[in-house]
Structure formats: C-alpha cells, structure tokens
Amino acid sequence: MATYKSDIEIAQSVEMQPITEVAKTAGIDDKYLEQYGKYKAKVDLKLLNDVKKPDGKLVLVTAITPTPAGEGKTTTTIGLADGLRKTGKNVMVALREPSLGPVFGIKGGAAGGGYAQVVPMEDINLHFTGDFHAIGAANNLLAAMLDNHIQQGNSLGIDPKRITWKRCVDMNDRQLRFVVDGLGGRVNGTPREDGFDITVASEIMAVFCLSSSISDLKARLSRIIVGYTYDDKPVTAGDLKAVGAMAALLKDALKPNLVQTLEHTPALVHGGPFANIAHGCNSVLATRLALKLGDYAVTEAGFGADLGAEKFLDIKCRMAGLTPSAVVIVATVRALKMHGGLAKTELGSENLVALEKGLPNLLRHVSNIKNVYGLPSVVAVNRFPTDTDAEVALVIEKCKELGVNVVLSDVWAKGGEGGKELAREVVRLCEEEIPHFTFSYEDGLSLEDKIKAVVTKVYGGVGINIMPNAKKELAKLTELGFGNMPVCIAKTQYSFSDNPALLGAPEGFTVTVKNVKVSAGAGFVVVLTGDIMTMPGLPKSPAAERIDVDDNGVITGLF
C-alpha cells in the first residue's frame, strides 16, 4: 500500500522564498512591505491607490454540498493558482485565514493540502500575524465598555436584559456559550446572562472582512447595535464612544497578509469565515489587492455553493462592486456517491447507481451558478485512485447536458502541474465567455421576499415557514430602516435544506426561519434556520491531542 507524506511534512520539506522575493513576483515594492519575520509580511493599503494597472479577472472557487468524504476546495484554489502561473499567467491567490478553534478541534489545519498549500502552514494555522487576536480584542473592548457604561450610571438607559452583544474567543469552547457574569457584589458589575461566540462568528469579523478602508471600518463599527434601551431604542458602538479605540486595535490587522504557495505563487491570507454562516472568504481589501496586482485573482468561498458562493455573490459582490469572470465548482466522485446514499466505508468500489443518484447535488449547484447568477463555470473533479473511468465519464456526460465542462484536477498529488488543464479552461472562460451577472434577489424586495428568493431559487425549496418571533423581528427591523439590507442565511452546510439528513438535491421542502437579527455594522440581516452554533465545542478526541512541538521548534500534528 502506498504511503503518503502528511500535509505538514510536505510543507516542511519545501524551501520557502524570502517574502521580499515573493513580493517582487507580485510587483510589490519594498516600501509597501511590513515584514513579520522572513516569510510573512503585511501590505500597506496605500498600494491599492498607487497601482495604476486595470483590475484582473476574478475567479471564484466553490464546491458541492460538503460530506465527510471531502471535496478539496482550498487545495483546488491553490493548485489552480499555481497551474495558472505554470501556464505563464500573472496570478494572485486570496484565501481566508483558519480559525484556531477548528484547527485544534476537528480540522487540524486549513491551508490547502498535499502539494497545493500555502506556507508557512504552521504559522498560518496558528497565530499568524495576530489579526484574529486584534479582532477578539476589539470585540471584547466593546463588551467591556458596554458593561462599564451600565456600571457607571447607565446614562443611555440600556436594558441589561436586552443586550445583544457577546464576548468572543478564538477557540471552540461550549462551556462559554451561556454564562452569568457580574456576580459577587456591586463592585464586580451588574449581574446578567451573557455568552461567547467564536471570534470568526463575531460581527467584528464581518465588519473587518467587508471594510474597504479605515474610514469605512470606523463607519461600520459605529453602526454596530449592542442592545436596546428600556424604551426599545437601539444602542450602538458609536453611542458608547468605542469606535476610535476599536479602530486603533484593528488598524494593522486591516492590512492584508502576504505569504506564498509551495510553488512560490504570491498569496494573500486575510479575513475569515464570518458569522458562522459559511461565507468562508477573504477580506474585500485582500480581494481588491489581488485584482490590482494579478491578471487573475483566484479566491474561494466556504462550504457548498448554496452557502459560501451565495453569500460571496449576494453580499460581498453587491457591497464591493465585484463581478467574477469564472466560477470553479469542486466535486469528488466519492462525495457524490455519499449524496447517493453510500456510507463512507463503501466509497472504494465502482457504484454508478449511487453516483447517478448523488449527481443532482452537483447539477443543482452548476445550474445555480449558470442560471441564477449568470456566470460562466467549470466543474473540477478531484480524482481519487479508486474513481473508475465509467464514474468519471458519467459526471462529464451529465455536466455537458447543462453546457458545462468538466476538468480532472490532480493538484493534491502534482501541485500546479496537476492544475494546468483546469487553468487553461478557466482562462478560456475568462477570455471567451461574458458574465451576465445577476443577484438572486434585488435590493428593493422585502426581507421576507429576499429569504424566499434564496430558498426557492438557490436551495430548490418551495417556500419558507417563519416562526412568530422571527416574523415580529422582521417587522421591527424593517421599521428601524434595515429592510433594504441583504440577507445572510445561516443553515446547515450538509444539505440544500435546513435538515442535514436530506442529502443530494431534495425537493418540496420548506425552510423554517427560527430567528433573525441585524448585523448593522456588517450591513446585513442574519437569518437563523435550524440549529446553528456560533460557539462550537471540541469533539471527543480533538486535533489538539495530536499537535506537538519539539526542542527545535518543529511542529507536528497539523494536517
């Protein structure tokens, strides 16, 4: 049986270029670099205004509905960028930064895999340049100032029972979901129920990812609603005079981080999967910088296309004025067979019946990108040794019926060389096909109609069921002037529906809206369906148990 190096062993075996050399490849002058050691740097935001080159082509990588069998979206994103560079293209890749909670919990790392990774992978997966710590500090400063305001006389009349702002920490810790604090007498604050989110689920993360400048950051921070007064008026971070200090904490974090792939392609790693709603994309600033520097900017969005790509297109592109030139939809035969009803242990042998049963999942994602959003697309199939020619042929046949090409990708094993065919198809799409980009809903619709549009057009459902409390909140948010905002729907990543057990491409279902809340700073209304966690817990055997460091500082156990 073949033995394979782990991701971290591969990453540690490759000699990195000094970040100054990577910057030269990207066309970044030394004066815009703020180095964090030899292999990491932040890029001064002045560069965005100083580069006079027209924007490059934006390529979005997304995927089918995820399964335990895996899809390899980040790996494909990185391998595609390396493949584009191998075919002579000027390319930048822009990725989100991994969160410590999942790294120590279930993932063990998230910087690509095999021979398609960004490095230094240990740094990227751990503290990196401290951005997430800055986001957590800004979040918790606002929480401290809010409770201090109540302690010092509460001149704004904030109702302690109606505080919506939570503290956060960059770690999965279910113990902190619901807490009571301020106990032990008046000197210790006002006793109240409280709770923590994981840092990447905080509104500060969303504000950070969507801000286009320091001034835009401050404007968004000022609009954050932290709670309500006794007479039902919203209270903002601006009301608490917290904005300047929060922005000061975030000033350096807002600058995108420059690293490299294993093949020395320049990579920007910045921002994270905010609000636990599977946006899973880098910041607007990093995307814009990648477009300024590269002729092609390759980026990704989290989970399946119904979650990450929908939010990328309906929220990020709407706010930032971006239009992708091409979309890559990543799939594996193994995952499609799971959608067809097979267990993970049954994926090693040919099963065309299960594959055909699972294929509608891929086809719905393809149809959404093509017909709902009007964007050119290609399906990238990560081929495994157990995939048979007949299985691959079936995927190609069904996609061709929708007018979409399928390319086999082998970037995990071969890096950029295994991504050249995909790169050539992406270039063809960018050069020969014109995007007719439309959103799944227009700004002028009501919040309810926006939710309904996503459910019926993107998920394939027949409608929505809004719980009474959510109905009341939608009316209130509309009254407060938030009805024109996009909707950010939080639902399970494992199904098009809000029921994780409904695999493939279910039909005839309704989605239950349990609650809604406004992220006024970020600029969207969060719609909660099903059981969505903003503070996950660790599994029975967390990845942390297998992570270690030796006397030479060499880390093991990340994967």
Image: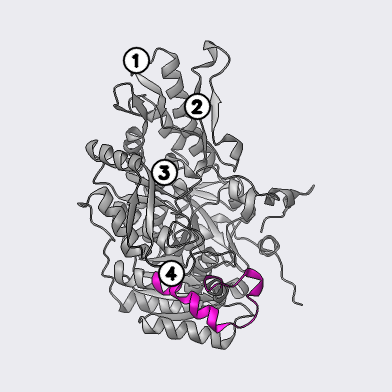
**Quarter occupied by the N terminus:** bottom right
Q: Nearer the viewer, mark 1 or mark 2?
A: 2
The CA distance from mark 1 to mark 2 is 21 Å
Residue under pointer 4: 505
Q: Which mark is residue 193?
A: 2
The CA distance from mark 3 to mark 1 is 29 Å
Q: Nearer the viewer, mark 1 or mark 4?
A: 4
Secondary structure of the residue carrying numbered label 3 = helix
Q: Give the residue type that dot 3 points to.
A: Phe
Q: Is residue 497 visible?
A: yes
Q: Position of residue 220 (x, y in %)?
A: 33, 38
Q: Position of residue 334 (x, y in %)?
A: 58, 74
Q: Position of residue 374 (x, y in %)?
A: 29, 70
Instruction: Tell me, yes or no, whether the highlighted magenta stretch contains residue 347.
Output: yes
Q: Give the residue type that dot 1 points to.
A: Ser
Horizontal placement of 117 versus 139: left or right? right
Q: Give the residue type that dot 4 points to.
A: Ala
State the residue at coordinates (54%, 33%). Answer: 178
The CA distance from mark 3 to mark 4 is 34 Å
Which residues lie in the magenta part? 338-365
State the residue at coordinates (32%, 34%). Answer: 223
State the residue at coordinates (27%, 46%). Answer: 485
Q: Nearer the viewer, mark 3 or mark 1?
A: 1
The CA distance from mark 1 to mark 4 is 53 Å
Residue under pointer 1: 155
Secondary structure of the residue carrying numbered label 2 = strand
The CA distance from mark 2 to mark 4 is 41 Å
Q: Main secondary structure of the magenta part?
A: helix
Residue under pointer 3: 208
Work out whether residue 61 or residue 181 is closer to the camera in this orientation and state it.
181
- Label 3 crowding class (10 Å Cα cut-off): few <14, some 14-19, many 20+? many
